[in-house]
Image (spheres, rainbow, N blue to C red):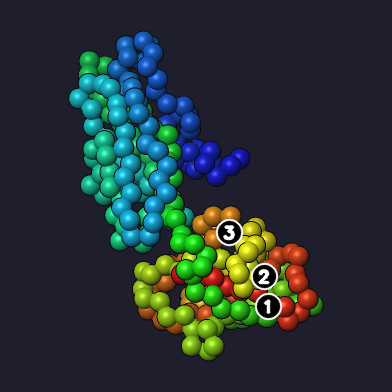
Amino acid sequence: MNIRIATAVALAAALGTHAAEKYATTCGENEKAGIPIILCQPMDQLVYPKEDAVFKVAAKGDNLSYKWFFENTNGVLEVPEALGPEVVIRGNNSDRLGFYVCRVYSAGEQGVVQTQTRVATLTERLPSIQTLSAISGPIWTNPPPPPPPPSTFCCTPICGYINYNNGGAGFSLASGQAMTIQLSPNSSGTPLINTALYCAQWRYGGQASQAGCFTNLSSTQERFVAPVTKPYAITVYIKSGCAPQGTLYYLFYQ
C-alpha cells in the first residue's frame, strides 16, 4: 500500500467515513440524496520554504460549509480557522508538511449530509544541491559500532555509521527550526543516496529525551525540527552497501 492510499485510509477512519478514495461525483443519485458534489479537488502543493501554500475545493450543494483536516506524524488534526473552500497554509508554520483533506457539508431537505475530497500533499522544494552547505565524515564499519548515547540506531540493520558534529561546534538550531539533509558519496552531491539505504539521528545531549530520528521528506531528503535551541550532532547509519572504513560521505544540509 503506498503512502497516499494508506494516509487516505487513516484520514477516512479518523473522520468517520466509509471509504478512503471514493468521492461524490455528479450523478443523479448523489444529488437526490443531498450529497455535496465535488466539482474541483484540492491539488498537491510543492512550495519553497517560507512560501505560503493554498488548497482549494469547489463543490455544489445546499448551504455548503467546510472543514479542513491535516495529517502528519502527530496524527490527524483540524486546521485552525479553516472553514471555507480555500485554506492558506502559511510558510512560517514549521510543522505544515503532510496531507490535507476537506470535509464538505450540505444542509438541505435531507438534513446535513457530508462528503470529503481527495487527500492532497504539501511538500517543500529544496534549493539546488549547490546552494546547500556540506560537511564530510569518514564511515566506520566492521563490526557495526554501538550507537552514541542515547542508545538508539533509528534503523536496523546497519553496516556502518558516520558522525557529523561540525568540527565539534555542532549545528546550531533554534527551537522550531527545521534541518533538511541529503547524503552523497561525492563532494559534487552526485549521486544522492536514497533514504531507503540510511537513517539519521539528531541529538543535543546524552539522555534519551535529548535525541530523536530524522523522518523521510523524499527519496533523497531527511528532516527534523529542533525541539530546543541547542547545538546538534548528527549520526548517519548506513543500512547496506557500506564503502570501506574511512571512506568519506558528504552531508549536505540546510
* Residue 42, visible in the rendered structure: yes
CB contact under 8 Å: marks 2 and 1:
yes
Instruction: Locate residue 188: give its quadrant.
Output: bottom right
Under circle 3, the secondary element is loop
Residue type marked 3:
Thr
Residue type marked 1:
Leu
The residue most toward the left is 63
**Which percent across, then down, holds residue 6?**
54, 41
- In the drawing, does residue 82 fall left or right of residue 161? left
Which residue: 76% across, 65% down? 241
For label 3, count other residues whose C-alpha is less than 10 Å away and answer few (under 14), some (14-19) or many (20+).
Answer: some
Residue position marked by numbered label 1 in the rendering: 248
| Nearer the observer, 213 or 127 | 127
Residue position marked by numbered label 3 in the rendering: 220
Which residue: 61% across, 40% down? 1
* Residue 67, visible in the rendered structure: no
For label 2, count other residues whose C-alpha is less than 10 Å away and answer few (under 14), some (14-19) or many (20+).
Answer: some
Which residue: 65% across, 62% down? 191
Residue type marked 2:
Pro
| Nearer the observer, 126 or 146 | 126
Identify the mark at residue 185; answer none if there is no mark.
2
| Nearer the observer, 150 or 99 | 99
Q: CA distance from mark 3 to mark 2?
A: 13 Å
For label 1, count other residues whose C-alpha is less than 10 Å away and answer few (under 14), some (14-19) or many (20+).
Answer: some
